[in-house]
Image (cartoon, rainbow, N blue to C red):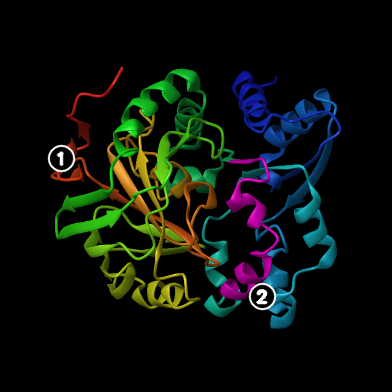
């Protein structure tokens, strides 16, 4: 019996990248995502396009985890030419995460992780500059449910409830909020142990209403690279990256650069990521979560960054379509909850307080 939610999910993902006849579409995912991968490839075929299926058991687009653990460093730094050709020549890409264990990548030494990300970075530049249509989502697995402290079926209901929204209506709702940011020059984030200012002057705001990540439900931009000043503490939720979990992250910025960083847990990993390249200590993104279907933290950044009443900053690579000029192999989204004592100011005016918008927005 086909699950109508999976059929709709697949259709939404193919619609999101507007697959055209004759396109070569890379469809990549883990083996546990088979039901969704099958529906996606079927829908791609229905559009008259090629489905290039890549099914793995963990790891990255350029190699499985076991290979990344044992291969010489020069191979990590210089990925397979055939795989790089695929990444540079496909017309679109759909990625589905369905991990058996969300912490598998934690076994990969930090220097190997950095080499792997740096090696593939030039090939996926098309993802960052917007020239490659892409979308990414998740398929409900026991591992993801366990991270969210939910039974698997309950997590599946939660996932589909966040993904299968009326995205036209959500886009209009987020547009009204995003328009507050368009003319602004300075954003100030205030909360517990937090007072951070950054400039978004001249930087376009992009709305993700189910067209990039699945689920959608955020708007974002790239801050001016040398503008961040002050301190932010991510004390509400753990931050997860490459299978590692950091808690109590505290960052102090001067001239746009992280000059002091600490964490209550996994501080060594945090600092190693900040030191991975020249751009890792600058901000690549400011995002505002707006998805009404996501009401709790799940140790799952794809969902957590869209949580209504939160904001997130990304360390590392900027977003060219937002005017971002920072370059880094990493892009680490870290979420801060503003629903209990936090606020957002635009050029000195409070526009959101305790997670609620309290400034009249244009119709």
- Left or right placement of residue 172 versus residue 48 in this view: left
Decide which of 120, 296 is in the foreground and name it. 120
- Left or right placement of residue 1 versus residue 192 in this view: right
Task: Identify which residue is drawn at 41% across, 37% down.
Answer: 218
Is 345 located above or below residue 275 in the figure?
A: above
Task: Identify which residue is drawn at 73% across, 78% down.
Answer: 71
Q: Quadrant of residue 94?
A: top right
The residue wearing badge 1 is 349
- Whether pointer 2 and pointer 1 mark residues with C-beta atoms closer than 8 Å, the reply is no
Quick one: SS at disc 1? strand
Asked if residue 99 shows in the view, the reply is no
Decide which of 45, 102 is in the foreground and name it. 45
Percent position (x, y) of residue 104? 57, 63
Q: Disc 2 and disc 1: Cα gap in Å?
A: 50 Å
Q: Nearer the viewer, mark 2 or mark 1?
A: 1
Q: Which residues are magenta?
A: 113-136
- Asked if the magenta segment contains residue 129, the reply would be yes
Marks counted in the figure total 2
Q: Quadrant of the C terminus?
A: top left
- Asked if the magenta segment contains residue 237, the reply would be no
Neighbours of disc 2 within 10 Å: few (<14), some (14-19), many (20+): some
The residue wearing badge 2 is 69
Q: Quadrant of residue 62?
A: bottom right
Is 48 located above or below residue 283 in the figure?
A: above
- Left or right placement of residue 67 versus residue 246 in this view: right
Q: Quadrant of the N terminus?
A: top right
Percent position (x, y) of residue 24? 82, 40
Percent position (x, y) of residue 279? 47, 70
Q: Quadrant of residue 259?
A: bottom left
Asked if residue 88 shows in the view, the reply is yes
Decide which of 52, 29 is in the foreground and name it. 52
């Amino acid at each position: 019996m086909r699950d109508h939610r999976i059929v709709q999910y697949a259709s939404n993902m193919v619609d999101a990248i507007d697959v055209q006849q004759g396109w070569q579409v890379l469809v990549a995912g883990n083996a546990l995502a088979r039901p969704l991968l099958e529906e996606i490839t079927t829908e791609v075929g229905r559009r008259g396009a090629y489905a290039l299926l890549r099914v793995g058991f963990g790891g990255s687009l350029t190699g499985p985890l076991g290979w990344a653990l044992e291969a010489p460093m020069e191979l990590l730094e210089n990925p397979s030419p055939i795989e790089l050709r695929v990444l540079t020549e496909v017309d679109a890409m759909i990625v589905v995460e369905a991990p058996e264990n969300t912490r598998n990548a934690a076994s990969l030494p930090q220097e190997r992780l950095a080499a792997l990300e740096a090696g593939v970075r030039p090939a996926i530049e098309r993802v960052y500059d917007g020239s490659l249509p892409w979308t990414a989502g998740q398929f409900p697995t026991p591992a993801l449910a366990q991270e969210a402290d939910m039974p698997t079926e309950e997590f599946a209901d939660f996932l589909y409830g966040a993904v299968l929204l009326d995205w036209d209506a959500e886009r209009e709702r987020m547009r009204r909020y995003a328009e507050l940011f368009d003319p602004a020059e300075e954003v100030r984030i205030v909360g517990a142990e937090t007072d951070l200012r950054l400039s978004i002057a001249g930087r376009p705001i992009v709305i993700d209403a189910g067209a990039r990540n699945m689920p959608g439900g955020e708007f974002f931009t790239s801050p001016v690279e040398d503008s961040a000043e002050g301190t932010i503490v991510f004390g509400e939720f753990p931050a997860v990256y490459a299978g590692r979990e950091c808690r109590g992250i505290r960052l102090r910025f001067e001239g746009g650069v992280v000059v002091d960083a600490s964490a209550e847990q996994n501080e060594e990993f945090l600092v190693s990521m900040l030191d991975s390249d020249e751009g890792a200590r600058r901000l690549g993104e400011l995002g505002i979560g707006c998805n009404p279907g996501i009401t709790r933290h799940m140790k799952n950044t794809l969902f957590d960054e869209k949580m209504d009443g939160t904001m997130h900053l990304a360390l590392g690579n900027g977003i060219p379509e937002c005017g971002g000029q920072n370059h880094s192999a990493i892009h680490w989204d870290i979420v801060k909850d503003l629903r209990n004592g936090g606020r957002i100011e635009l050029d000195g005016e409070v526009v959101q307080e305790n997670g609620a918008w309290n400034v009249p927005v244009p119709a």
